[in-house]
Amino acid sequence: MLRIALFALIAVVAVLVGLSLLPQQTREIPGSEIALANTALTLYPEADPDAVWFFEAQNAEYQPNARTTTLYNVDDGRRVVNGDTDFTLSADELIIDNRDNLRSDELFVYLIEADWDLHMQADDARQVLIDQSQGKFEVPLLTYSGDGIGESRDENVRMHFDLTDFEAGGPDTVGYNRFADTSGTSSGTSSETSPDTSPGSADTNDTPNVEER
């Protein structure tokens, strides 16, 4: 009886040894990112509770570890305050960071009340930033046009969403502003440093009067 038990034990050990020598199967762990197609996303910024952002994008990726969302080919983005659309935006790529701020290398923004088009671009050092807590655009290179102005350009721009508190320029920056007049002609000013006036406060009779909300 003992001999039979010993033979059985040897057989079990042999089987276990054989199994341990088999090639191990590699366990594939799926990537942690979450990818979606044809995405409609709604953002409720904690730092700006009165605003709601809506985005429609062809693709979206969420990184749980970094808590960031990247939207690709955003063709319908908008900020809504108390039921009214403040401005719209579009971008090839838009990142929503873990503080609900928006970052991009290039943004196209349309300010509805002012009737202005803003083309925002990054430089080698910084991306375009939409800061939710400050309610500001921070733009390395801004080209803009609209009601009462021709195409104008400023660098290193910081301004509120409603165009108030406009700051631009600094060392080695270039600014150019063109303003329309009632005769149909236009006048322009350029400078190698920041212009002293903001788009809403420049010396012109035809620039839009944007009220601060």
Image: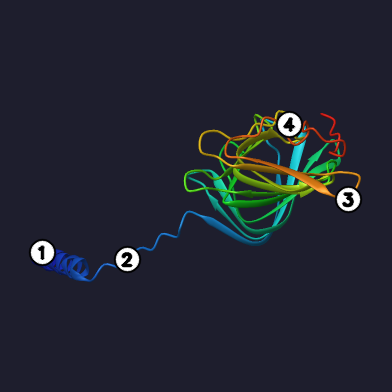
Tell me the number on the disc at residue 49.
4
Tag nearer the camera, 4 or 1: 4
Measure how far apart labels 3 and 4 are at the Cα level: 43 Å
The image quarter in which residue 2 lies: bottom left
Identify which residue is drawn at 81% across, 47% down: 186
> Does residue 160 appear in the picture of this structure?
yes
User: Decide: marks 3, 4 in contact (CB < 8 A)?
Assistant: no
Label 4 neighbourhood size at 10 Å, few (<14), some (14-19), many (20+)?
few
Picture coordinates of residue 123, whole percent (x, y): 52, 48
Residue 105: image x %, image y %? 57, 51
- Looking at the rendered structure, the secondary structure element under dot 3 is loop
Q: Give the label, 2 or 4, closer to the camera.
A: 4
Amino acid on which the number 4 mark rests in the picture:
Pro
Residue depth check, mark 2 versus mark 3: number of the one nearer the observer: 3
Q: Which residue was labeled with disc 2?
A: 26
Q: CA distance from mark 3 to mark 1?
A: 107 Å
Query: What residue sits right under mark 1 in the picture?
Result: 6
Query: Tag 1, which secondary structure?
Result: helix
Give the foreground label among 2 and 1: 2
As measured in the structure, the alpha-carbon distance from the residue carrying label 2 to the one carrying label 3 is 73 Å
The earlier-in-sequence mark between 2 and 4 is 2
Q: How many marks?
A: 4
Q: Amino acid at mark 1?
A: Leu
- The amino acid type found where label 3 is placed reads Gly
Can you tell which mark lies on residue 184?
3
Report helix, strand or loop for mark 4.
Answer: loop
- Please report whichever mark, 3 or 1, sits nearer to the chain's N-terminal start: 1
